[in-house]
Image: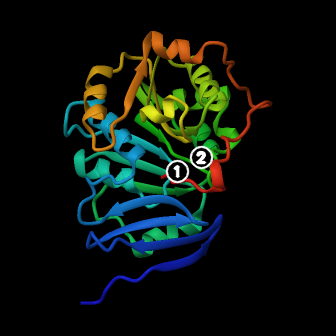
Amino acid sequence: MDEPIPVTRAVDHGTAKLMPDVDRKRAWLLTVDGAPQSYVDLDEPEHLEFEYTRRLGHVLDTVAEPGRALDVLHLGGGALTLPRYVAATRPGSRQDVVEADRGLLALIGEHLPLAPGTGVTLHGADARHWLEAAAPDSANILIADVFGGSRIPAHLTSTAYAQAAERALRPDGVYLANLADAAPFAFLRSQLATFSTVFEELALIAEPGVLRGRRFGNAVLVASHRPLDTAALARRTAADAFPARVEHGAALRRFVAGAAPVGDEEAVPSPEPPGGSFGIG
């Protein structure tokens, strides 16, 4: 049997590499310019390798009754890890994936194609431009996982962007975002303040060491108009192989206190991770 071999290709926003996992038969790691972007197991799409994707998975598992089909909008595609997860765990879901790097979409389509009948539609477009043109009240879930290199682009951090996200969601919809920061958390706190101008309910999921300011890391933002099942989320994230904490309510308000929402004029990208390379998607 032929062994899978790594694939390297120039894409629109850098050099992408697909590297097989020697421990899992049809699993692959995607990097762009050396930064880990995605991990996907074609035989087991329910397997989530990266810590933050596992936390997004916990939210996806608790936002609606198990197995219920949902309309999901993904901003940022990578190797389509979460679209594959939703298709496997919530069959019949309709999903749109918006990825600015058309070359990356072509690479994934060629080497890691989606299984037939997954209900996933791919769009090569800028995330904010596509979102602003999206039909209102069209999604149950919106997942933002967009990085330019290792940083979230500035135009996806403002109140105008948050308003566009809210407009695309149904009244009981849930917004999820993969963010990254380190103490003193100026970026993370500003994002929470920004989304609090649009959504009444917020929660933050992160590894305790990140929240204590010990290291740079990912944090998952969850926002909605309806109450979030933070108790179920806390149980799942605490029992995970990579335990995390769920902050919400008064504790989260104290964390955000003094931070100001961000408009388009003052928006900046997320901070550069130490060393300039960071696993993100």
Q: Is residue 119 visible?
A: no
Image quadrant where one finds the N terminus: bottom left
Bin the neighbour count of mark 1 within 10 Å (Cα to Cα): few under 14, some 14-19, many 20 and up.
many
In the picture, measured across the screen, residue 221 lies left or right of residue 231, that is: right
Q: Residue at 41% of width from left, 75% of height from top?
A: 111
Q: Position of residue 154 (x, y in %)?
A: 70, 40
Relative horizontal placement of residue 126, taking residue 231 as reference (left or right): right
- Residue 171 position in % (x across, y down): 42, 21
Which residue is the extreme one toward the bottom? 1
Q: Which mark is residue 127?
A: 2
- Residue farthest to the front, as pictured: 214
Give percent across and percent down for residue 178: 50, 40
Taking the view exactly as shown, the residue that stands out farthest to the right is: 265
In the displayed structure, 58 sits above or below 76; it is above
Q: Earlier in the sequence, mark 1 or mark 2?
A: 1
In this rendering, is residue 29 above or below 244? below
Which residue is disc 1 drawn over?
A: 76
> In the picture, residue 247 is in which quadrant?
top left
Q: Residue at x 19, y 36 (%)?
A: 66
Residue lying at the far left of the rendered structure: 66
- Residue at the (35%, 71%) spot, across then down: 21
Colour scheme: rainbow
Question: Does 73 sit above or below residue 202?
Answer: below
Residues at circles 1 and 2 in contact by the CB criterion of under 8 Å: yes
Query: Could you tell me if residue 133 is visible in this image?
Result: yes
Mark 1 or mark 2, which is nearer to you? 1
Q: Please provide percent x and percent y for residue 61.
A: 27, 36
Q: Amino acid at mark 2?
A: Ala
Say which amino acid is labelled 1.
Gly
Mark 2, residues whose alpha carbon is within 10 Å: few (<14), some, or many (≥20)? many
Mark 2: which secondary structure? helix
